[in-house]
């Protein structure tokens, strides 16, 4: 038996079905998700609430590894349970939980009560170059990030509404060298 705040197949189908007026109508808000020992961010996370007619709250979560700017993840998350109803891994690399081999491509995880996150497929509507770009920095990838977010929302049947505003992920400043710590060749 599921407790209050749990995600169900029925609830997931409601948010993904397009009939609950689900929409993004706010600005992407970025924060540092994890930090290296030297104080520089290693991962950034963007978040936007998804507005809908449902009483349960959903968010769009956007995660980017700063040093691997070409490899990132977008998540449609059911907030009360923390369930990732859909997760898009762009140029993602990890072990396929069913087949046991490594997935080295853009793929989508479709959550369900029976299969959890094991249902993986290649999304057709995500517009990007599958190969790793030669120059992949937060700045050079910005247009792709924006486009993939729009495509991911279309894949999830969530409308980009008038109040939506893309904000680029913040580019971390280079750390200042500490006095007395010279760099050696």
Image (cartoon, helix red, strand yellow):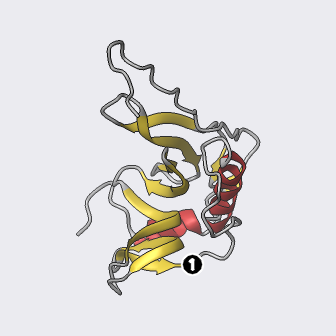
In this rendering, the answer to whether 13 lies above or below 5 is below
Q: Identify which residue is drawn at 57% across, 33% down.
A: 171
In-front residue for pair 177/39: 177
Give neighbour class at mark 1: few <14, some 14-19, many 20+ (Cα, 10 Å).
few
Please state, as top left, top right, bottom left or bottom right, where the N terminus lies in the image. bottom left
| Quadrant in which residue 128 is drawn | bottom right
Please state, as top left, top right, bottom left or bottom right, where the C terminus lies in the image. top left
In this rendering, the answer to whether 97 lies above or below 76 is below
Residue with the mark numbered 1: 122
Question: Residue 125 vs residue 52: left or right?
Answer: right
In percent of width and height, residue 24 lies at 64, 47
Question: Residue 108 vs residue 9: left or right?
Answer: right
Question: Residue 57 vs residue 52: left or right?
Answer: left
* Residue sticking out furthest to the front: 185
In percent of width and height, residue 147 lies at 71, 55
Determine the secondary structure under disc 1: loop
* Residue sticking out furthest to the top: 179
Q: Identify which residue is drawn at 36% across, 83% down.
A: 101
In-front residue for pair 1/117: 117
* Residue sticking out furthest to the left: 1
Q: Could you tell me how many numbered marks the image carries?
A: 1
In-front residue for pair 89/151: 89
In percent of width and height, residue 21 lies at 65, 56
In percent of width and height, residue 32 lies at 44, 35
* Residue sticking out furthest to the right: 162
In-front residue for pair 31/9: 31
């Amino acid at each position: 038996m599921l407790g209050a705040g749990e995600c169900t197949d029925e609830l997931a189908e409601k948010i993904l079905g397009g009939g609950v007026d689900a929409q993004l109508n706010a600005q992407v808000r970025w924060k540092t998700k994890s930090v290296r020992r030297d104080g520089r961010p290693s991962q950034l996370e963007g978040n936007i609430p998804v507005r809908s007619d449902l009483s349960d709250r959903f968010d769009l979560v956007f995660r980017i590894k700063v040093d691997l700017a070409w490899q990132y993840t977008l998540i449609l998350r059911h907030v009360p349970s923390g369930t990732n109803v859909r997760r898009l891994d762009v140029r993602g690399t990890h072990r396929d939980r069913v087949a046991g081999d490594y997935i080295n491509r853009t793929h989508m995880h479709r959550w369900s009560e029976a299969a959890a996150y094991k249902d993986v497929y290649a999304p057709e509507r995500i517009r990007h170059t599958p190969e790793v770009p030669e120059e992949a920095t937060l700045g050079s990838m910005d247009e792709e990030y924006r486009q993939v977010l729009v495509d991911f929302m279309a894949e999830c049947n969530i409308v980009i509404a008038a109040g939506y505003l893309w904000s680029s992920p913040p580019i971390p400043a280079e750390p200042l060298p500490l006095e007395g710590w010279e760099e050696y060749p």
